[in-house]
Amino acid sequence: MKTERSKQLFARAKRVIPGGVNSPVRAFGSVGGVPRFIERGKGCRVWDVDGNEYIDFVGSWGPLIAGHANPAILKAVRSAMSKGTSFGAPTELEISLAETIRDAVPSIQKLRMVSSGTEATMSALRLARAATGRDRVLKFEGCYHGHVDALLLGAGSGVATLGIPGSPGVPSSYANLTIQAPYNDIEAVRSAFQKWGEQIACIIVEPMAGNMGFVPPVAGFLEALRACCDEYGALLIFDEVITGFRLGWGGAQKHFGVKPDLTCLGKVVGGGLPAAAYGGRGDLMGQIAPEGPVYQAGTLSGNPLAMAAGLATLELLAKPGAYEQLGAVSARITSGLEQLAVEIGVPLCTASAGGIFGFFFHEGPVTNFTEAADAHPARFKRFFSSMLEQGIYLAPSPYECGFASLAHRPRDLNRTLEAAQVALEKAARVR
């Protein structure tokens, strides 16, 4: 496989962009080799600048649930673009998308559009602190909620602990207001509330974790978080930037029947353009300016091109059978990987739900970040490299999940599993 043009562009990029990329994981740091510079995409495939073709399971890290260059989405964006790209003033498209989201997501009565998932979580935290008059936040090890200072922490211990800064530039005073517990460990959560309960403004959680690999909640975990928040007067925030409209219509909260106070959305709701949202109960959202005193603003919030792309995407997902199709793609990949792993004799565990899937080179089950970190990184690196060389584009990190799209067809999945057999055989030889 030729990579000369990507190598040239990467060298050029590193002279003007930190690390040569505009988001760290794109640099292929954990898998080695040169990142592929993508030139175009269509359906479930992308082509790089060297002319190599790949079946894509990254999907721009989740937003492209309808595939690349979907005709209906392109038509909607072109129509909006012909009228202007941005106004800094309200448009009807904002209302239409907000109404669609409100009608789909059980906990949302009102919502505010922003431009990124990080903005959504940052704003939801500010609102939670204002509404409760408390400062502390409880999050979970291995859950990523954007590069918000209060949420960018180093790994904690096996019990609930106060956070430590996970990046230079994060003040200790910010991190000290954040409590971190292992994902799926409700006893650690209860311990934290027993110690700091009257100071905790909120719990923020990925209802299905997608940033330590794909890790579902154990039975009763989300329900226990709801109960703890109710007992101590804290708010429950679901970060559904990944799961929102990808797990199913209405997201994880509808799937599990647990209603948070606030919800953060992103990725799919922008249809591949920069858009996100946070929303929840009307009394809480009524505290956001200009209706209330909690300030939050954004120059490009509700951008008409992003609103058009998001609306077109949700219209496609609302069609009968869309989520069944996505679930079948994810399940085919994970069941195929598991069967091949057994035949080859390499430890592998998988998980899938809706349009999300993940796997670990680990006996399993994986229920938290500590267990995810015990997976075999060298085997993943060998597997990833082999899949890439065979034209299968996966996330270049063992701590990311895979994304199915409506554009993946049975022939694409068959080709993917053919490549996986070769890649698993290579990974099995890594000790």
Image: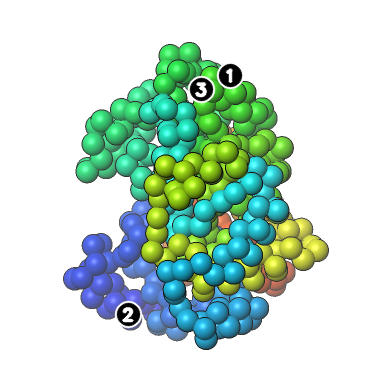
* Farthest residue, direction top: 194
Q: Which of the two residues, 348 or 95, is positioned nearer the viewer here?
A: 95
**Earlier along the polypeptide chain: callout 2 or callout 1?**
2
Q: What amino acid does circle 3 point to?
A: Val
Rendered image quadrant of residue 196 = top left
**Earlier along the polypeptide chain: callout 3 or callout 1?**
3
For disc 2, the marked residue is 4
Whether the residues at callouts 2 and 3 have beta carbons within 8 Å, the answer is no
**Earlier along the polypeptide chain: callout 2 or callout 3?**
2
The percent position of residue 288, horizontal first and vertical second, equals 47, 46
- Label 1, residues with CA under 10 Å away: few <14, some 14-19, many ≥20: few
For disc 3, the marked residue is 189
Query: How far apart are labels 3 and 1 at the CA level?
Result: 13 Å
Q: Is residue 94 visible?
A: yes
The percent position of residue 7, horizontal first and vertical second, equals 30, 75
Image position of 265 with respect to 178: above or below: below
Query: How far apart are labels 2 and 1 at the CA level?
Result: 59 Å
The percent position of residue 348, horizontal first and vertical second, equals 58, 44
Image position of 419 with respect to 294: above or below: below
Whether the residues at callouts 3 and 1 have beta carbons within 8 Å, the answer is no
Name which residue lies at 61% across and 52% down.
Answer: 244
Tell me if 425 is positioned left or right of 321 in this view.
Answer: left
The percent position of residue 13, horizontal first and vertical second, equals 25, 72
For disc 1, the marked residue is 231
- Label 2, residues with CA under 10 Å away: few <14, some 14-19, many ≥20: few
Q: What amino acid does circle 1 point to?
A: Glu
